[in-house]
Image (tube, helix red, strand yellow):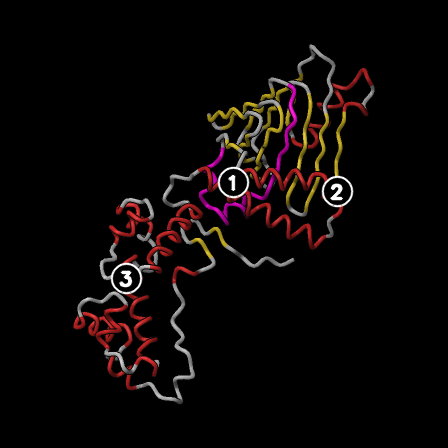
Amino acid sequence: MTILVDTNLAPSGDRTGYWRQAVERLFGAIVRVDTSTPLDARLAIHRLERVQLIELSGNPMTFTRAAGSTAVTITALAMLAGSAVLTQEAGRCTISAGELCLHASDAALVLELPERVHAMAVSVPAAEFLDLFPRGREALRTAIPAAAGAPALFVDQASTLLGRHNALDAATATAIANSIIHLLGAVACSVVLDNPNCAHRAREKIERVLRFARTHLRDPELDVETIAHAVHLSVRQVHRLFANEPMSLMQWVMTQRLQNCYRELRQSSTRNRSIGEIAYEWGFSDQAHFSRAFRKHFGRSPSEVRRMTSSANEAAAYAAPPDPFDLPECRACRFRARKMSV
């Protein structure tokens, strides 16, 4: 469904009245128009399932809106040309061309357009957005450059949808609405880049740490300091990244080493190698320590596991427990990779 408000469709002597009435009816907003030049403005509203796409162009004007009394939305306002000043809850955000800004409808808002603009806005249900990204409000009223990364992808996708939304069937519209909400979450997450609780940022750092650790499991000197230096993080940052995880980094390293030793001890091809050799190959420099850790983890000694090997049971591959860091969910902010019904 598309709603079009265009001053060129109004009687020439009543463009301002036509525009004011339409804006108040659609958004509950009062608009003040610069009357020094003839009003030339256009507003197109497109509904894509539960996401609303808005395109606005026009002369300088100011919108004033009270706090929303209906369903609360989170809106991303992107300036394609011109600039805007958004004031809400004592916060003030100046948005230049090539930037976007997020705001919520549950607080009064003043939007000033001091020059002719071309802007685009995308509104999503606040409840769903904040369920996926509870810290999303921290990204409100902040000018976000949209030249690269998630903000650029968000603007590109929304711009494309403005021209192609009518060609989508219901199932496709729902799927794309899902992706818009998730992509907006990635935009919000990019704003709190230095926040250790930002799921995407924290997840990227964790994966970087684990990648290095996986490729150096055999190194007996591997420790937090070595890993932190290799991935350009401080030791404190690494400890903080894993503070709320199922296990610490070095507990994970120990688990990975033990599981690799278990796997090799079950293989007949390694029977000519001693248990100590296998342990040393996987980063254990003390065989007594290895044996104690192995028994504690598996409930059997390394020699008992080796005796379990036979031609009958060797065919069954060792199934390691799921890696706790392979979960399809960013635990820090619950930005879920949920399975959506379409």
Q: Nearer the viewer, residue 25 or 184?
A: 184
Residues rendered magenta in the picture: 116-140
Residue type beneath disc 1:
Gly
**Quadrant holding the N terminus:** top right
Question: SS at mark 3?
Answer: helix
- Give the label, 1 or 3, closer to the camera: 1
**Residue 103 visible from this viewpoint:** no
Q: Quadrant of residue 41?
A: top right
Residue that appears at 43% across and 61% down: 326
- Give the label, 3 or 2, closer to the camera: 3
**Residue 84 visible from this viewpoint:** yes
- Give the label, 1 or 2, closer to the camera: 1
In the rendered structure, the answer to whether residue 223 lies left or right of residue 131 reads left
Q: Residues within 10 Å of mark 2 (few under 14, many from 20)?
A: few
Q: Residues within 10 Å of mark 3 (few under 14, many from 20)?
A: few
Residue that appears at 66% across and 52% down: 174
Q: Which residue is mark 2?
A: 1
